[in-house]
Image (tube, rainbow, N blue to C red):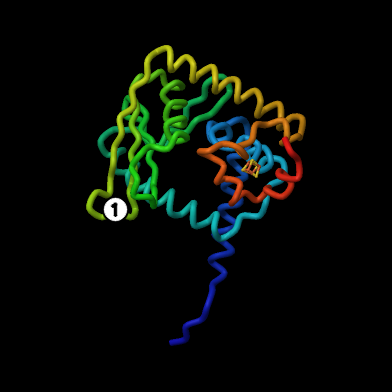
Amino acid sequence: MIVEEGSPFKDQLIQLLTKEYGKEREGVHVSDLLMCMREQVFRRLQPMPIDEKDLSFYALGEGAHLALERLAGKGGAVSEKVVIVNGITGTIDVFDNIPIEIKTTRSRDPTPKPFHLKQLGYYMAMTNSNVGVLLYIMMNDYERPFRFRTITMSNEELASERREIEARGRVFSEAVHAKDPFRATHVKDDPDLGWKCKRCKYRSVCWSRNN
Ligand code: SF4
């Protein structure tokens, strides 16, 4: 038996993921509006090569999602439900009369992150659901590997989220059409999302300007 380092399979997977991400880049998606809109505009206009890290985020995230979505589907829930409202597309992990969003986390802190609440809030607004669920898969907590959080929002809060989605969608589209990522909002000073900059492939060009 000969054991050799590496395999062409890795490059094949990266190519396939590149194709997969390429398909998603039409229109406006909720995922474009949630975190750093500027990064999303950069990705749309100047796509960077997909690397091993991207592949690992995809595999770890999607793997856990798929298993639970398939299981929920056996009970009649709809997995990967696509909703389109005012030209903006959202893909909800599981829809079982209410939206259910699945998150994997390595943290042992089960407090929902503001951007997770925001994403679920957008899906609740888009499906006119006053209730939604965040399901956390706690990858480093073997004693309590799942945490569920039920979120309730009033009709006024849903309406406010819908206005926000539309406004952010407009800013995103305008930045893409103008081919100018600097027209989109950024997260440089955001206490919840500033960490995005450390991993961002567009950091040097973005930080070369003050705005
Ligand atoms: S460096 Fe930060 S602010 Fe700029 S595009 Fe990337 S994530 Fe957004």
Identify the residue at image location x=74%, y=46%. Answer: 205
Quarter of the picture containing the C terminus is top right
Residue furthest left as drawn: 143
Q: Quadrant of residue 123?
A: top left
Residue 204 vertical position relative to residue 182 in the rendered view, above or below: below
Identify the residue at image location x=53%, y=66%. Answer: 9
Seen in the image, is 133 located left or right of residue 57? left
Quarter of the picture containing the N terminus is bottom left
Residue 158 point in image, percent of width and height: 44, 17
Residue 206 point in image, percent of width and height: 71, 43
Identify the residue position indicated by label 1 in the image.
Answer: 141
Residue 19 point in image, percent of width and height: 60, 50
Seen in the image, is 75 located left or right of residue 67? left
**Element at label 1:** loop
Residue 165 point in image, percent of width and height: 55, 23
Residue 141 vertical position relative to residue 68 in the rendered view, above or below: below
Identify the residue at image location x=49%, y=20%. Answer: 161
